[in-house]
Image (cartoon, rainbow, N blue to C red):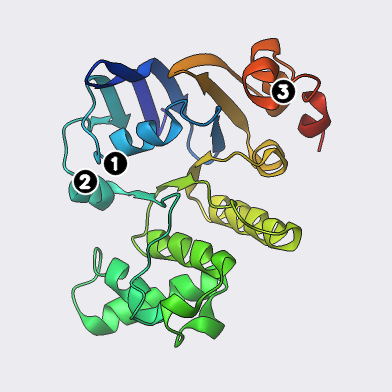
Amino acid sequence: MAILEIKNLTKNFGGLRAVDNVSFAVQPGEIFGLIGPNGSGKTTIFNMISHFYPASSGNIIFNGLDITRLKTHQICALGIGRTFQIVRPLKRMTVLDNVIASAFLRCRTMAQARRAAEEALEFCGLTPYAGHLAKGLSIASRKRLEITRAMATRPTLLLLDETAAGLNPGELDEAIALIKKIRDSGVTVVIVEHIMRVIMSISDRIHCINHGQTITEGSPLEVANHPEVIEAYLGHGGGGQYAER
């Protein structure tokens, strides 16, 4: 059974249809890529899954349960974590305290939340920064803190929204390694990403949308060489060079 099913999902903002009848299913244990040009509706889909925006129509099924109308905190408690394109840590708090705040979703005491936060920091490689104020972190470390906060909620499904944006080549390698580590720990990952080096190298399957509508879905090789994907997203001649890496 799919861990996540998106069925005919649609979102209207007044007269604008941002997402138009999109459907896909994510299998447990895979890294599922969601790509498309800027403004194609990728983050809007994430926002509907986590109920930051209510869906205009369609259904979102998580582990067999229809969560379309549930509140954001209820969805998180069921096991869906997410990150955001624009990271907004609690700047005047330490890195550890930022993660403790997230850990309280599952923990009842400060001692439990602290232990859970320390485990998440260790897993994500941020332990050396635990006592640092979040406002002093680099972009790469802020992105990693965003992932760490999400992991502290102990998700079974993690939505990653452009976590590699703004990173240099070395930091990209570290981000790729962390995403694979998360998947290997038993967490299913759905990732929105514009950097082809990342999305093509780690995704088991990719779903591509444009203007809110599905273009195609398949393996990285199949998607990268699809004519409409090349036209709409990768640009002329930009196909298979990515998919074979």
Quick check: can you spot residue 118?
Answer: no
Quarter of the rendering occupied by the N terminus: top left
User: Which of pointers 2 and 3 indicates the residue nearer the eye?
Assistant: 3
* Alpha carbon separation for disc pair 1 and 3: 31 Å
Q: Residues within 10 Å of mark 1 (few under 14, many from 20)?
A: many
Counting residues from the start of the chain, the first of labels 1 and 3 encountered is 1
| Disc 1 target residue | 50
Disc 3, SS: loop
| Disc 3 target residue | 235
Say which amino acid is labelled 3. Answer: Gly
* Residue 63, quarter of the rendered image: top left
- Is 159 placed above or below 217 here? below
Q: Residues within 10 Å of mark 3 (few under 14, many from 20)?
A: few
Asked if the residue under mark 3 is in contact with the one under mark 1, i.e. CB atoms within 8 Å, the reply is: no
Say which amino acid is labelled 2. Answer: Thr
Asked if the residue under mark 2 is in contact with the one under mark 1, i.e. CB atoms within 8 Å, the reply is: yes
Q: For this view, does 111 lie left or right of residue 165?
A: left
- Is 88 placed above or below 96 here? above
Counting residues from the start of the chain, the first of labels 1 and 2 encountered is 1
Disc 1, SS: loop
Say which amino acid is labelled 1. Answer: Ser
- Is 11 placed above or below 166 here? above
* Alpha carbon separation for disc pair 1 and 2: 5 Å
Tell me the tag on residue 72.
2
